Image: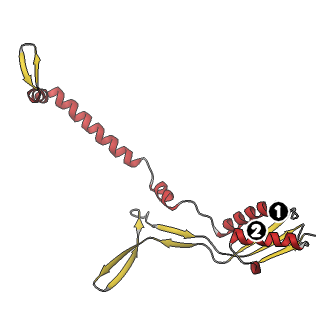
């Protein structure tokens, strides 16, 4: 491509070569390059490591918080069943939550081994949590106003069993005094 400026004919590459030779152009190019590198560096510092780890792990409950959460949800549902009225619920938890960590499997020859994946650097190292298995519910006690009516008790048994996945032998329903 040829560009005509005044009476001189320039090819595009010749014009670029002429611009590069100017000292002012080189100064501007160096300043723009340094500014771009500075912005890239600053963008890498904007997120602390704790936020990155929290985003990967998510929000989890302790065993007590988990039990209270289930109790509140069950209370809300059970109190809506016809004949139940006010209900107090106690949920018992067996073992606490179980953490499953990500593993990096290695196979050499006939031997297989695995190592837990660790993220972070220096003193801020954490095992990468693949998943957390919720604690197991071992029993539920419900004390409610309709606890003396067999039809109401049957509805409560079915609702709690469906919501928690535990059998009727681990659920107890009693009448409120």
Residue 51 at x, y percent in the picture = 49, 54
Residue 173 at x, y percent in the picture = 83, 74
Secondary-structure class at tag 2: helix
Task: Using residue 6 as the reference point, say whether residue 56 is left or right of it.
Answer: right
Q: Residues within 10 Å of mark 1 (few under 14, many from 20)?
A: some
Residue 6 at x, y percent in the picture = 10, 13
- Colour treatment of the image: secondary structure
Q: Is the N terminus in the top left, top right, bottom left or bottom right quadrant?
A: top left
Q: Is the C terminus in the top left, top right, bottom left or bottom right quadrant?
A: bottom right
**Dot 2 or dot 1, earlier in sequence:** 1
Distance, label 2 to label 1, CA atoms, is 9 Å
Q: Which quadrant of the figure has residue 159?
A: bottom right
Residue at the spot 63% in from the left edge and 73% down from the top edge: 135
Q: Nearer the viewer, residue 53 or 84?
A: 84
Residue 95 at x, y percent in the picture = 63, 77
Q: Nearer the viewer, residue 70 or 164?
A: 164
Q: Which residue is mark 1?
A: 81
Q: Is residue 49 above or below residue 18?
A: below
Q: Nearer the viewer, residue 133 or 154?
A: 154
Q: Is residue 6 above or below residue 56?
A: above
Q: Is residue 76 above or below residue 108?
A: above
Instruction: Tell me whether the residue at label 2 lies in contact with that at label 1, contact meaning CB atoms closer than 8 angstroms.
Output: yes
Q: Which residue is mark 2?
A: 159
Which residue in the rendered view is the most extreme toward the right? 177
Task: Using residue 126 as the reference point, say whether residue 167 is left or right of it.
Answer: right
């Amino acid at each position: 491509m040829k560009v005509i400026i005044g009476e001189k004919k320039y090819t595009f590459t010749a014009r670029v070569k002429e611009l590069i030779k100017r000292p002012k152009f080189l100064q501007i190019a160096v300043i723009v390059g340094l500014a771009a590198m500075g912005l890239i560096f600053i963008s890498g510092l904007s997120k602390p490591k704790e936020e990155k780890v929290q985003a990967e792990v998510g929000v989890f409950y302790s065993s007590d918080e988990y039990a209270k959460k289930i109790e509140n949800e069950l209370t809300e549902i059970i109190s809506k069943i016809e004949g139940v009225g006010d209900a107090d619920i106690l949920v018992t938890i067996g073992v606490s939550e179980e953490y499953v960590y990500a593993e990096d499997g290695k196979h050499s020859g006939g031997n297989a081994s695995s190592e837990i994946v660790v993220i972070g650097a220096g003193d801020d190292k954490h095992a990468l949590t693949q998943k957390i298995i919720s604690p197991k519910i071992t029993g539920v006690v419900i004390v409610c106003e309709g606890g003396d009516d067999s039809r109401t008790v049957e509805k409560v048994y079915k609702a709690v069993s469906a919501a928690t996945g535990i059998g009727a032998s681990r659920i107890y329903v009693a009448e409120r005094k």
